[in-house]
Image (spheres, rainbow, N blue to C red):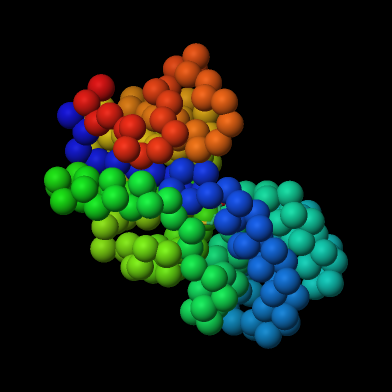
Amino acid sequence: MIRAIITDIEGTLSGVAFTQQVLLPHAVQHLPDFVRTHSQVPEIKRLLADIRAYAGGGLDDTALIQRMVAWMAADQKITPLKALQGLIWEEGYRRGDFQGHIYPDAVACLRQWHAQGISLHIFSSGSVRAQESFLAHSEAGDLRPLFSDNFDTRIGGKTHVAAYKLLAERIGHAPDDILFLCDDGRELDAAANAGLHTTLVQRHGEVDDTGPHPVVTDFYQIRLMP
Ligand SMILES: CSCCC(=O)C(=O)COP(=O)(O)O
Ligand SMILES: [Mg+2]
């Protein structure tokens, strides 16, 4: 029986276009100013040091910013870079520059599952801070009360089986009681190999249901009984 649901954000709860056309361009535009004005804030100083080390060291601020812009343009999921993006987006959400895009079918089902007593969790490459501001400023209002826990790639890579085993431990349910919803087959494979139930959320394109995961095109089609 499914007692907990873990969901991805981009491509699952929210359109890929929102990340590609709103969030990433916003981060690219505001990154240079953000780094200049916050580089002595301890949290940001640490993140910049981690990103510089990831780049192999030896980059001054200007070169590092250029490298980060290139990584963002390629939507690279580098943990400290995602954390930095999350902080830039937080300011954008607060200013009202944009709201988090979320599919209405996802909102309706999340509300229903929450009312049924199923615990809801997020596992996304977006940092926990980015997830929280996305939920707080979503087009459907503040959705944070629906979720018990949020996790990002500090717990492990999304294609790594160990990350899902740890997630199950952290949320306190057996893997067999958990359903993972995601738009990425490799991430679902890792979750299935950890013993979780899985469903591929394929919002666009031809539905390919020849793979190992049940496929849906919206949340209304999700079946909780295997
Ligand atoms: C609210 S997180 C913004 C989207 C993002 O930056 C991201 O990396 C989402 O990746 P996901 O793992 O949710 O597909
Ligand atoms: Mg995704």
**Depicted 199 relative to depicted 170: above or below:** above
Instruction: Identify the image quadrant of residue 180.
Output: top left
**Depicted 13 relative to depicted 194: above or below:** below
- Left or right of residue 63, residue 26 in this image: left
Give the x, y percent position of residue 217: 44, 34
Quadrant the C terminus occupies: top left
Q: Is residue 156 visible?
A: no
Tell me the residue at 73%/49% (across/down): 74
- Left or right of residue 218, residue 22 in this image: right
Tell me the residue at 53%/21% (across/down): 208
Q: Is residue 104 visible?
A: yes
**Depicted 215 relative to depicted 56: above or below:** above
**Which residue is most to the top?**
210
- Left or right of residue 175, residue 25 in this image: right
Tell me the residue at 82%/64% (across/down): 66
Give the x, y percent position of residue 28: 72, 66
Give the x, y percent position of residue 55: 76, 55
92, 206: nearer the viewer = 206
Tell me the residue at 62%/62% (across/down): 22
Instruction: Identify the image quadrant of residue 218.
Output: top left
Quadrant the N terminus occupies: top left
Tally of numbered tags? 0
Give the x, y percent position of residue 92: 56, 75
